[in-house]
Amino acid sequence: MMITFFDKHICNYLDNESGYDESDIKLIKEKYKTEITDDLSKGHITTNVGLVAGSILEENPKNLAKNIKSYLISLSEIDNIEIAGPGFLNIFLDRSYFANVIDDSLKLGRDFGSSQNGNGKKIQIEFVSANPTGPLHVGHGRGAAFGDAIGKILQANGYLVSKEYYINDAGRQIDILTVSVLLRLYDCFNDKEFPDSGYKGKYIIEIAKELNSEKKLSNEEIKEIITNLPSDSEEEIDLLIREFKAKDSILWSRTKQESLKVVLKSIKEDLKDFKVEFDEWYFESSLGTLQEKDSKISSAIQELQKKELAYKKNGALWLKTNHAGDDKDRVLIREDGRATYFASDVAYHKHKVDRGFDKLINVWGSDHHGYIKRIEASLEGLGFSKEKLFVQLVQFANLFQGGKRLKMSTRSGSFYTLKDLIKEIGVDAARFYYLSKQADQHLDFDIDLAKSENKENLIFYIQYAHARISSIQSKYLSKNKILPKNHLSILDGSYLACDQLIHESSKFPGVVQRAADTLQPHLIVFYLRDLAQMLHSFYNDHPILKESKENQASIIRSLSIVQLVISNGLNLLGIKALDKM
RNA sequence: GCGCCCGUAGCUCAGCUGGAUAGAGUACUUGGCUACGAACCAAGGGGUCGGGAGUUCGAAUCUCUCCGGGCGCGCCA
C-alpha cells in the first residue's frame, strides 16, 4: 500500500537526512499522519509531517515541508508534490502507480479490505446474552447486529475471534420463568389474577401447553397460593418460588428444565434467522455452586479471599472494588449464603481470561454501565490487567412507525420482538439500520424508512449502486465474451472520469482498519453511502456503452472495484450485496 | 447528589487519535429521461458546531465550567 511506502521514505528522511534530535524525531513519528486525500484536488496522498515537525521544532512548517519534498520528489512513484495550506505535502502519484489500485484490488477480490494487522490475537466477544426468559426483542437485536459485525470486522483484520453467548440459567430470573409457566399450567384463573411479578407474555402460555405435564396440585391449592400474596412484588415472587418448589419439587425442576430448553431454542432460532452465529454458548450453571469446593465460582471467591480483597461484613461477603474507582464495595455472597449475580460474573470473567484470550469485548446494554467498574475491579483483584477487558455499551433503539414511537413494555409482555422486526423489514435492512449509528448513542429506528425504496433509505441506495453495476456488466457481457482484463485508457491518462471512483475505492482498507480499531461498524455504513453516491453520479453523467472500446474496458474495470468494495463492505456488516432488486 | 452518554442546517444524522472552505439526506426553490435501472442525477438558499473560558501555529474535535436532554447508581439480574 502506498501509505506505508511513503511513511518508510519519510522516516528514512527523518532518521538519516533531517539532522533533527533523536527525541524530536521520535515525537514527530508518533504524531504525524499520512492519509489518502479526501479529494483529488489535493493529490492522492497527503501528509502533515511538515506541520507536526514545525510545531515540535518551532520552525516554519512550510520550509520543513520543502525539505521533505525535495527528498521525496525523485521517487519514480511520484509525479508531483505540492505544498499546500499551512504546510501539507500533497503527493500526486505517477499514473501507473495510481492505476495499480485497480489490479491490486481486483486481484484480492473478496480479501480486498482485509489485513493481518490483528496478528492472530485471540479476541472474545460476548454479546446478546439476554436472559433466557423470553423471546429476543428489538433491543437485543442491536447488540446482536453489533457484536456479529465487529466479529466479522475484527476477523477481517486478522484477529482470531470467538463469539460467545452467556446464558443466565442459574439465577432468580429462571425461577420467575418457572413460576410463570407453572401458573399457566394450572390454567385456573384469569389474566387479571395473574401475579404482577410473573412474566405475562403469550409465549409463557405456549410453553405451558408444550409441557404437557401431569398436575399434582389441585386448583384449590393453586388458588390458595395466589390469594393473599404479599403486595411487594419482590416478596410476592419469592413466596411463589418457595411454594411451588416445596409443593412439588419434581415438577418444579422438570418445568424449569423444559422452560429453559424451549426459550433457549427460540432464542437460537431467532439469532440464526438474523444470521448471527455464536461459537460458544456458555451456561452460568457450569460455573458450579458455592457448595462444591472446587467449582469455578468457589475457587474464584477463594482466591479473592486469599488475597484479602473479599471480606465479611454484616454476615455477607464483600469484594473491595473501591480502589478501581467504583463508588462502593459490592456483595459477592448474600447474608443468606446465596451467591449474587456479580459473584457468578466474577468467576465467569476469570474463566474467560483463563481460556487464554488476549482481549475480551463485552457488548452490554448501556443500562449496565454502572457495572463496568466492579468487573474491572474483580479482574484486577484476580491479578489480571483491566485493559484486557473492553466493554462496549449499546444504547437502546426506539422504534418508529407511521411517525410515532412504538412503546414497549417488557413487564406486561407487550414488546416488539426481533422476529417481528425481521418479518416486517427483512434481515438485511434490520442489520443495516442497527449498525447505522455509533453503538453508544440512541438510535431512532424508522420502520417505514427501512422499507422504503428511495435514496433516503441508505441500504436501498447502496444496494441499488451495486445492482446497477451488475446490470451494466451483463449488458457489456452481452456484446463481449468476458469482462475486460485491462484498463489502458486509465493507465495512459486519456480517460480520467473514473479517477474519483478509483480513489474513493482505495480508501476501503483504511476504513475497515479504522472500524476495527474503534469497533465502529457505522464507519463502513457511511463510507459505502459516499461511494454509492459517487457511483450514481458517475453513472448518470456517462453513457458508458457509447464510449470507445478502450474506455468501456477502463470504466467497467473501475466500476468492478466499486462493486467489490460495496459487496465486501456489506459483507462485513453481515449483509449480502444484490445483483438485482 | 455522584457516574456514564449526548447537544452540529427547520428535521434525521456524518465528521471527534486536533489540521487545509464544517458535510450528507430530508424539506423548500429549480433543472435533467427518443441513453446502459429517473428506484437516479445536478444547482441554489439554509450554521455564533448548546453558552463561556483555556491549551495550540491551528479546536466541532482536547481541558475546565455552566445550561439542556437520556441512562445508571440494590445483599436485582
Image (cartoon, helix red, strand yellow):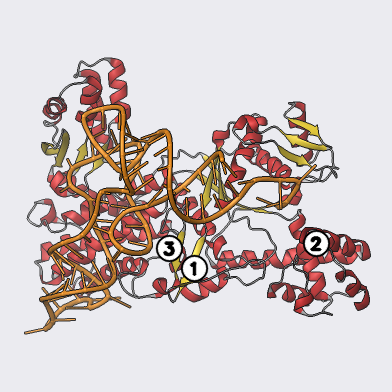
**Residue A399 bears which disc, if any?**
1
Residue A356, horizontal then vertical, whole percent: 61, 37
Viewer-proximal residue among A216 and A125: A216
Secondary structure at badge 3 equals: helix
Specify the amino acid type for callout 1: Leu
Specify the amino acid type for callout 3: Phe
Distance from Cα at disc 2 to Cα at disc 1: 31 Å
Secondary structure at badge 2 equals: helix
Q: What is the chain letter for disc 2?
A: A
Label 2 in the same subunit as label 1: yes
Kindly identify the residue that appears in the image at 26 percent across and 50 percent down: A506
Residue A253, horizontal then vertical, whole percent: 85, 62
Distance from Cα at disc 3 to Cα at disc 1: 14 Å
User: Between tags 3 and 1, which lies in front?
Assistant: 1
Specify whether A170 is left or right of A16: right
Contact between marks 3 and 2 (CB within 8 A): the answer is no
Specify whether A129 is left or right of A186: left
Residue A75: tell me if it is visible.
yes
**Residue A432 bears which disc, if any?**
3
Q: What is the chain letter for disc 3?
A: A
Specify the amino acid type for callout 2: Ile
Q: How busy is the neighbourhood of tag 3: few (under 14 within 10 Å), some, or many (20 plus)? A: many
Q: How busy is the neighbourhood of tag 2: few (under 14 within 10 Å), some, or many (20 plus)? A: many
Q: Mark 3 vs mark 2: which is more N-terminal?
A: 2
Secondary structure at badge 1 equals: strand
**Residue A206 bears which disc, if any?**
none
The residue that label 2 is drawn on is A237
